[in-house]
Amino acid sequence: MDVPLWLALVVVGALGIKLIRPPWWLVAVILLGGYLLADSFLTPVIDPIAK
């Protein structure tokens, strides 16, 4: 099953906020940073670690 990246980010963010209750700005920074890293030149380095 293929899930769009934006949908996965929304679900992970919602679960993180509900379970851990961090500040909203921290959640936004982490999610945006992860999204930007996924499409950067660091992708080949991060990919084996993420799997």
Image (cartoon, grey):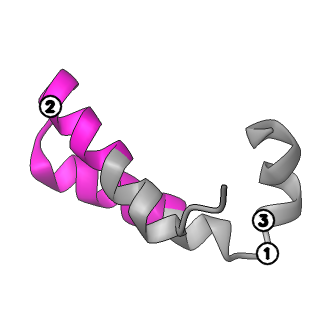
Q: How many marks?
A: 3
Give, as a three-letter code, the residue at label 3: Leu
34 versus 50 height, above or below? below
Name the residue beneath numbered marker 2: 18
Instruction: Give me the residue at 20% from left, 23% from top.
Output: 19
Instruction: Give me the residue at 12% from left, 29% from top.
Output: 21
Whether the residues at callouts 3 and 1 have beta carbons within 8 Å, the answer is yes
Q: Is residue 5 left or right of residue 47?
A: left
Residue 42's label in the rendered image is: 3
Quadrant in the picture for residue 43: bottom right
Residue 31: x and y in percent read: 39, 57
Give, as a three-letter code, the residue at label 1: Phe
Give, as a three-letter code, the residue at label 2: Lys
7 versus 12 height, above or below? below
State which mark lies toward you, 2 or 1. Answer: 2
Q: Which of marks 2 and 1 is nearer the N terminus?
A: 2
